[in-house]
């Protein structure tokens, strides 16, 4: 491997991939000692099949420097003959339904990004650089501006973006216009530099469809190891609801056997038949056991995202917010008074604050969703394919009313559910945000999230078992909308006797006898305790079945927090989320 190749690989943001590599070592907490417990039983209930997926734009950028690498594109734009020579030899150009000049619409994105530090949430990690791919899908009628479609993980946490046309030395600034991390899509705006570029054809309305199995496709992009456009070909091998590694959500995706490598993230997948866009490359597999298998976001999902951007609707995917049980047992179907020609799934739990709350109940048998009949395995025929039920719901928007036909206690009925976004007990797939936190008396409190758990390693096997159980199996309710974790203990006289070994990584149940529902409620409670007449703050913390009591003297908190600001070099005791609540308190004034 040459030095230039190694540099290119280090500066490219890889596509999400399923990795079988061991997890990185955990990072030490400031002023604390890690307590690690082996994670075994909590994951046994969650199926893990094959290698894990990860985005093709994994941050492999050199953190030591964010200077722009030297350009290798100082020559003038290549002729058609040169452009054809950089096309993969596996592609017969005579077979392509589009002129090779249209490949100018495929662009490279050069992104500087800044990730938050979920362990020490008052700071960020070092700025890094990465590259990805995208496609011009619209050009302004006047001027050289337009829109570029790419993968969300390419531009996640971005601070500066440049776009470079295929076979051009010029780079122009760009900005994110819309993003939907759940299905790894983003729309980037460019104000100049697209003159003469013919956009990639994007199907609309009746032309939007899922590709057929064995349909030949071309994957275009800028994989690591070079600066020229790469084109690979393959066929569609699978269409189903899959897990998106970028967001840890399940949504409709398409598997292709074309080679998709790091740097291809966000590149267009074009149909050999029509030349139109059939998908956006977003993740592949890592590991020697799987070869030439990649995944793309299909056209119906892309069309929904683009329409939401045009119409000004929130692109967030809606969710029914229920737990379901399959009805493949004849005895269970008979017990539920289902007829022989009935099929569907049974609701076992309704999430608090979800779309279904107040409309659907545990024990209901869902027979049809939006007029589409469900099978006993939870699948349905939608978009010409047998897919999981979630694909029906994710075609709608937040605020839409979805009709549902169900069986309740032997009686058939129809109800309408107004769709909402699902608020998860333990958030995951958080990007373009800063972590929320508050420090009181040397204790750092923050909401539990997957990003925080992954500080022990991506597979969570070394993460604290009681916190991992909340991630996999925790159930939200009126008094439990988030899990507030005591994540660090910064030693001081005011917290002597409450060591990290004793109370660290516990989650908070109550403050002065009041149950803690979420981080907002917790901050309001401690603010009331500090500003009131109480002499002590009493926190009940737990790891599940074993509880501890933490007591802080209110009179000592101001001096302690002022001391810790200098001792631990923490510039501010709380995130911006709680500025209004905390800055008005006498204890926190000026901190």
Image (cartoon, grey):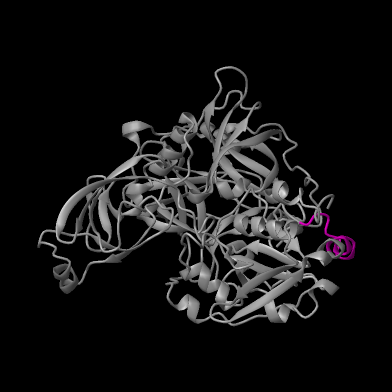
Q: Residue furthest top?
A: 142
**Residue span colored magenta:** 561-573
Is residue 10 or residue 473 the one in the foreground?
473
Q: Residue furthest front?
A: 533
Q: Quadrant of residue 94?
A: top left
Where residue 431 appears, as percent x and y from the top left, is: 61, 51
Q: In the picture, which quadrant includes the N terminus?
A: bottom right
Where residue 555 appears, as percent x and y from the top left, is: 82, 65
Residue 492 visible to an observer of this rendering = no
Where residue 319 appears, as percent x and y from the top left, is: 40, 51
Q: Does 568 appear in magenta?
A: yes
Q: Quadrant of residue 557?
A: bottom right
Q: Quadrant of residue 29?
A: bottom right
Residue 85 visible to an observer of this rendering = yes
Q: Residue furthest left?
A: 340
Is residue 584 or residue 25 the one in the foreground?
584
Where residue 249 appears, as percent x and y from the top left, is: 47, 57
Is residue 436 or residue 168 the one in the foreground?
436
Q: How many marks?
A: 0
- Rendered residue at 77%/81% (across/down): 497
Q: Does 136 appear in magenta?
A: no
Above or below 30: residue 309: above
């Amino acid at each position: 491997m040459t030095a230039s190749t190694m540099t290119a690989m280090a500066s490219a943001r890889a596509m999400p991939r399923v990795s079988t590599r061991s997890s990185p070592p955990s990072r030490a907490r400031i002023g604390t000692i890690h307590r690690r417990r082996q994670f075994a039983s909590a994951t046994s209930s969650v199926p893990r099949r094959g290698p894990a997926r990860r985005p093709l734009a994994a941050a492999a950028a050199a953190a030591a420097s964010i200077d722009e690498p030297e350009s290798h594109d100082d020559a003038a734009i290549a002729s058609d003959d040169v452009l054809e020579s950089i096309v993969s030899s596996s592609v017969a150009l005579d077979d392509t339904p589009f002129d090779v000049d249209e490949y100018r619409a495929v662009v490279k994105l050069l992104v500087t990004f800044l990730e938050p530090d979920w362990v020490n949430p008052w700071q960020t990690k070092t700025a890094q650089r990465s590259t990805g791919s995208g496609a011009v899908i619209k050009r302004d009628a006047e001027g050289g501006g337009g829109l570029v479609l790419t993968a969300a993980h390419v531009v996640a946490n971005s601070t500066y973006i440049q776009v470079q046309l295929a076979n051009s030395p010029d780079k122009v600034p760009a900005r994110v216009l819309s993003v939907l991390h759940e299905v790894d899509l983003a729309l980037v705006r460019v104000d100049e530099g697209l003159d003469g570029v013919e956009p990639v054809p994007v199907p609309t309305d009746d032309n939007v469809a899922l590709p057929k199995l064995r349909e030949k496709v071309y994957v275009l992009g800028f994989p690591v190891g070079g600066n020229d456009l790469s084109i690979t070909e393959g066929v569609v091998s699978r269409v189903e609801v899959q897990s998106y590694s970028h967001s840890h959500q399940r949504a409709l995706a398409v598997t292709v056997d074309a080679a998709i490598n790091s740097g291809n993230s966000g590149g267009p997948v074009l149909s050999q038949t029509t030349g139109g866009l059939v998908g956006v490359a977003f993740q592949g597999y890592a590991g020697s056991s799987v070869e030439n298998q990649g995944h793309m976001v299909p056209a119906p999902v892309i069309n929904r995202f683009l329409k939401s951007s045009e119409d000004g609707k929130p692109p967030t995917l809606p969710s029914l917010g229920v737990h379901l049980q399959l009805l493949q047992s004849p005895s269970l179907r008979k017990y539920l008074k289902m007829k022989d020609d009935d099929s569907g799934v049974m609701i076992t739990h309704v999430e608090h604050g979800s779309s279904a709350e107040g409309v659907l109940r545990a024990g209901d048998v869902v027979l049809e969703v939006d007029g589409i009949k469900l099978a006993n395995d939870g699948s349905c025929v939608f978009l010409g394919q047998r897919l999981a039920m979630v694909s029906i719901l994710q075609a709608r928007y937040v605020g839409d009313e979805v009709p549902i036909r169900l069986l309740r206690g032997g009686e058939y009925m129809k109800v309408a559910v107004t769709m909402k976004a699902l608020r998860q007990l333990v958030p995951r797939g958080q990007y373009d945000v800063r972590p929320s936190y508050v420090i009181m008396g040397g204790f750092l409190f923050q909401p539990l999230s997957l990003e925080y758990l992954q500080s022990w390693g991506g597979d969570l096997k070394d993460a604290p078992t009681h916190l991992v159980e909340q991630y996999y199996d925790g159930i939200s309710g009126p008094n439990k909308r988030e899990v507030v974790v005591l994540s660090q203990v910064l030693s001081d006289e005011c917290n002597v006797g409450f060591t990290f070994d004793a109370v660290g990584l516990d989650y908070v149940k109550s403050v002065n006898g009041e149950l803690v529902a979420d981080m907002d409620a917790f901050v309001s409670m401690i603010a009331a305790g500090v500003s009131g007449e109480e002499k002590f703050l009493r926190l009940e913390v737990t790891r599940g079945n074993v509880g501890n009591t933490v007591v802080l003297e209110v009179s000592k908190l101001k001096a302690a927090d002022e001391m810790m600001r200098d001792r631990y070099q923490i510039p501010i005791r709380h995130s911006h989320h709680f500025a209004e609540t905390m800055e008005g308190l006498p204890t926190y004034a000026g901190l």
